[in-house]
Amino acid sequence: MRFSFTDDQLAFRDAVRDLLEKECPPQRVRDAWTNVDGRSGAWDALEEMGVVGLSHPEVAGALGVDEIAVTLILEETGRFGLPEPIVEHTAVALPAVAQHIPEAVTDTSLFVAGGPMVPYATSATALLLERDRQLYLVDRSAATLTERASVDGSRRLYAVEWEPSNAVEIGGPEDAALAFDRGALGVAAQLIGVAQHLLDTTVEYAQARHQFGVPIGSFQAVKHHLANVALGLEFARPLVYRAAHSVARRDLDRSVHVSTAKAHASDAATVAARVALQVHGAIGYTTEYDLHLWMKRAWALAAAWGDAAWHRARVGRAILDTDPSEEQ
Amino acid sequence: MDLTFTEHEEAFRAEARAWLEANVPRPALPSGDTREGFARHLEWERMLFDARWAVVSWPEVYGGREASLMEWLIFEEEYYRAGAPQRVTQNGIFLLAPTLFEFGTAEQQDRILPRMASGEEAWCQGWSEPNAGSDLAGITSRAVRDEAGGGWRLTGQKTWTTRGAFCDRLFGLFRTDPEADRHRGLTYFLVDLGAEGVTVRPVERLDGDEGFAEVFLEDAFVPDRDVLGGVNEGWRVAMATTGSERGLTLRSPGRFMATAARLIDLYRRHADATDPAVRDAVIRGWMDAEAYRWQTFWTVTRLMEGGRTGPESSLVKLFWSELDVRIHATALELLGPRAELVDGDDAAWMKGWQFALSGPIYAGTNEIQRNVVAERVLGLPRR
Ligand SMILES: Cc1cc2nc3c(=O)[nH]c(=O)nc-3n(C[C@H](O)[C@H](O)[C@H](O)COP(=O)(O)OP(=O)(O)OC[C@H]3O[C@@H](n4cnc5c(N)ncnc54)[C@H](O)[C@@H]3O)c2cc1C
């Protein structure tokens, strides 16, 4: 048992962190709310660095990269609030499309996955969608896209209408389940990053802001709020890494591990957002201040790919409704 | 990342499982926090020791197996999975022993550790006093030099001493320099509870067991060889190992995995309990035990690669103590009107509930732990 990352995985993560620090500052996240396509600009740099295409089986195979390494990077994208659909493309759609119809992948293709809403669908080449436990690739032009507004204005969401008759079937229930688990794992990793950012910036604020002549962070009520955020994060993060391992190794209990991780990560991020706002007070309640960008990302991702209650219910079916004699 | 256990670890697990299955007493022993139950538990400790399961991580000369931290976790998982008895020797083994290994002389280690491991000498912890609880440095029990006797004379009172009425010896802090600053001037003593001048009064706990005690000392003699670490160094010596009390060595994940498994079993036996909120709470209990398990593997990997535990152990203490309360609260909801019964098959839940409620109090209250997390993990200013 060695439950930690390799030096290579950590070094790659650090390189991505450096890049995002430069290419995805809060101002870029803010711009993505109002610009034409919701892009931060960091995407191109990530593409150049090889991050966007990292999960293509040929690339991944050559570099020895799997979902464990990708998860670590997605956590960073959450921390920096990257708006672009890196979970939907890199974590979910690209590996599925590349495995089943490799010729559909070109240098410029962007795939997105999801349901019932799909982010950035109008920017995509094609959509990876599920129906009746079958996985389909739907050309953008074959789908009817209706713009929907997310609480997180940088997430360009679309409701999708489509017919299997106009789509290419690329996999069955196994593939659909794997795609879903990759998506839930990916946003769980991002939620960890979002929660970490909320905690870090709120601790910083609590040190700097003075009332009654002292930093507000010296008040015990504030300390205990923040300790609760640290607690949620500390115990959610290893579950996400463990689920990454289960997805990478196609563990038989993969879905239970992913759901446990997503439920905990959603809760950790939701608590972090709640506390962040309370500790900031009114300044956190304005869109002129950056905090709202991360709070809203937390709410959006907590609800995406199954919210905490949905994932707990899935765990419940596995641990409560199976025959106990089948267990170890 | 490699989440498989080695062949060696698997063999260790199998050996522990087989031994426990063959030896765990049935029916379960009476509570170890009663006089009769304590004696029965010491017999069990002796069996553990004879089979070299009492202190698996210790050196072989003291009855251990030199097991790694990972193997120790495996042993704990098996121990609680088998429903084995509570460890009435734990305050010695898990709280005093780490300090002895770090600060004790070779003579002290050789003299004390084997008898601790076998249960021949049972130890209790003498930190708290009537006016020193969370503010431990407020200790006023004192020790004065007895030059002629070659030792110290102890006077004062300790309280909330777990199993103090049944134990043989007490480890505790006493003030040796009343002039010094609160945190200086304390010394770590190993006290014989049978010594002249020592009176122990059992105190009934919330659950009705006599598990608490008050210890009164009046000029009780302690020889120099029973000073642990330097004179006036007691605070530093005691604090060096508080991480083991808060963290995983006191309450390993195996314990809560077993409690969560029992909760699921209870849920299944109450299949008519269809309240979705209770079902959700059962699922949360299981998921939280998993969270504790994986956070522990994460930490243990870091420790095995040379890391040290710091103030993060306060997060661990918060998590297990509050998890334990939640799981027991859920069990009582499942039991419905039968929750109040303290006889019969399910009585263990009401007893467990009461004990779970003490988790956020002992080993440093959870309010104190949240202060520690805020100040030492997050770096927020002290007041
Ligand atoms: C089951 C059990 C077993 C125990 N076993 C032992 C033992 O074997 N040996 C031993 O020495 N002791 C033992 N104790 C005692 C335990 O260590 C103390 O209860 C603990 O240190 C708290 O002290 P106190 O009870 O005096 O509470 P107090 O310190 O008086 O605290 C009362 C309340 O005030 C709060 N409070 C105090 N200070 C602060 C602060 N700075 N900020 C915020 N809130 C604060 C506390 O969190 C608590 O809620 C045991 C206790 C229990 C319940």
Image (tube, rainbow, N blue to C red):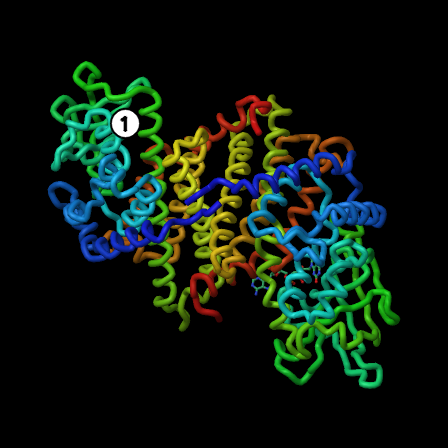
Q: Which residue is mark 1?
A: A116
Looking at the image, which is closer to me, A302 or B166? B166
x then y, percent, for residue A130: 28, 23
Q: Residue at x 61, y 76 (%)?
A: B183
Q: Estimate how packed mark 1 is, as few (under 14), some (14 to 19) or many (20 or more) residues with alpha carbons within 10 Å.
A: some
Tell me if A33 is positioned left or right of B195 in this view: left
Query: Looking at the image, which residue is at 48% across and 71% down?
Result: B383
B290 displayed left or right of B119: left
Pick out the residue farthest to the right.
B196
Nearer-the-camera pick, A136 or B156:
A136
Under circle 1, the secondary element is loop
Give whichever of A326, B36 is nearer the camera: A326
| Label 1 chain ID | A
In the rendered image, residue B61, in percent from the top left (x then y), is placed at 71, 58
| Residue A82, visible in the rendered structure | yes
In the displayed structure, does residue A99 sit left or right of residue B345?
Answer: left
Farthest top residue in view: A165
B22 over B147 or under it: above or below? above
**Dot 1 amino acid type:** Pro
Which quarter shows the C terminus of chain A?
top right
Residue A240 in the image: state x and y as whole percent. 40, 42
Ligand 1 occupies quarter: bottom right
Residue B91, quarter of the rendered image:
bottom right
Q: Establish if A129 lies above or below B201.
A: above
- x 23%, y 33%: residue: A94
x%, y% of residue B62?
71, 58
**Relative depth, front residue between B128 and B193:** B193
Q: Is B172 placed above or below A239 here?
A: below
Residue A32 in view (yes/no): no
Q: Is residue B150 left or right of residue A30?
A: right
